[in-house]
Image: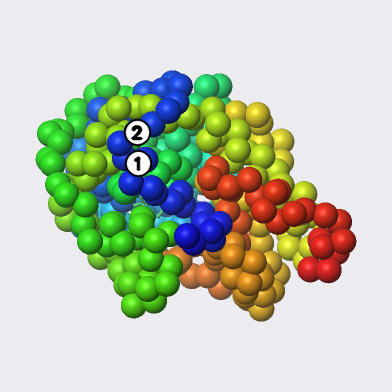
Amino acid sequence: MNRKITIQPKLKLSDLFIRISDGEYKFSDYIFKSGRYSLFCILKTILRSKNIKKIYVPNFICDEVIQGIGSFNLEIIYYDIREDFSLDTISLKKTLCSKSLLVVVNYFGIRSNWEEINEMKNELDITVIEDNCHSLTNYKNYKLGINGDLSFNSIRKIIPVLSGSELLVMNKKYLVDYTYQKRLPTLNETIYYFRRYLYFLNAFKNNIRVENKYHKINKISHADILSYRAIKMNKYPMRHIQQRRLSNFRFWHSYLSDKKLSFFEFNEKVQDEFLPYAFPCYANNRDTADKWIKWGSQNNISIIKWPKFPSGINQKTMKSCFKNVLLFPVNHQFEIIKILNYNKTELDKT
Ligand SMILES: Cc1ncc(COP(=O)(O)O)c(C=O)c1O
């Protein structure tokens, strides 16, 4: 069995059929294949009733988001965010055109400055899309996924399913045209999620990420039937998942505190009900980032550089803290503090 600590949950076949849990989380009725497909459906829904020409997207963003936008006749305008991942409403207000779309991301599960954003929204005629792909929706008091006019997440990034993303509508004037279409898992989904059993098959491993190649999404696709049923049965141990992810997050915060890595300024936003996707920090240059990625592979820990920027973003002009961002895994399937056998001497050597 491959014990590599991965960022995304690993799947056992039984995860799709048997679950022991509290079942406290209620998923919405609209379940799509992945975040980018939900975003595609959101745009289709909005543009059916509104003539909008511009979409504002943060410049710290991954290519996958642009895949969900690429098929529409929308001008993409990238905006800056602050070092605590919040949106600089004062500077954005100066350039934001009315009758446009604004995408706001809750990075790594850290809540954006929604109070300020909603104030700005009330002053301007804009539609806000909440990208909550790094967390889940409305978990207890840490209110996420319910702040935009519409929101979407990426269920499969947090809980073990083959595919799945939830679309939520807060502004009831938007009516989503939805009928679930059954489909079997694709070969890529199957290979990717059963990678724990395939680690010795390098030929397979090389093909695993094929689906992440850039392509514009131009039609709706729903979650595969196995994941859809598992999601609808709604019995995940969310409290355990959230708490383990948070304690892994806090572990990295402490473990990396005296390393040659820098932290973002989001500390006060990390509350007890925070459900993170990964622990973010940044290196001052590419070499240091690469050293950490190598350290991860030597220690069987998947550390990645994020994001894969869309080609339309000029990385040269963006804030340096966003250029070499590393994500450390907080996957609830591992108790990282035990695995790394955390002790001060080990720490000092790195
Ligand atoms: C911030 C953000 N939004 C949207 C997406 C798209 O989600 P998915 O991979 O489920 O399509 C991703 C990840 O790829 C992401 O990191």
Q: Is mark 2 within 8 Å of ligand 1?
A: no
Q: Which residue is mark 2?
A: 18
Residue at x-position 37% and y-position 23%: 26
Extreme residue toward the front, this view = 1
Q: How is the image coloured?
A: rainbow
Q: Secondary structure at mark 2?
A: loop
- Looking at the rendered structure, the kind of residue marked 1 is Ser
Residue at x-position 66% and y-position 62%: 282
Q: CA distance from mark 1 to mark 2?
A: 5 Å
Mark 1 touching mark 2, by CB under 8 A? yes
Decide which of 147, 125 is in the foreground and name it.
Answer: 147
Q: Is residue 265 visible?
A: no
Residue 260, by quadrant, is bottom right
Decide which of 3, 231 is in the foreground and name it.
Answer: 3
Q: Dot 2: few (<14), some (14–19), or many (≥20) neighbours within 10 Å? A: few
- Looking at the rendered structure, the kind of residue marked 2 is Ile
Point out which mark residue 307 bears: none
Point out which mark residue 14 bears: 1
Q: Is residue 84 left or right of residue 36?
A: right
Q: Secondary structure at mark 1?
A: helix
Q: Position of residue 289 (x, y in %)?
A: 64, 71
Instruction: Work out which quarter of the rendered image holds the C terminus and state it.
Output: bottom right
Q: Establish if 321 lies above or below 45.
A: below
Residue at x-position 24% and y-position 34%: 229
Residue 137, by quadrant, is top left
Residue at x-position 46% and y-position 49%: 9
Q: Position of residue 269 (x, y in %)?
A: 66, 35
Residue 18, by quadrant, is top left
Decide which of 36, 342 is in the foreground and name it.
Answer: 342
Q: Position of residue 69 (x, y in %)?
A: 28, 54
Decide which of 208, 136 is in the foreground and name it.
Answer: 208
Q: Is residue 349 visible?
A: yes
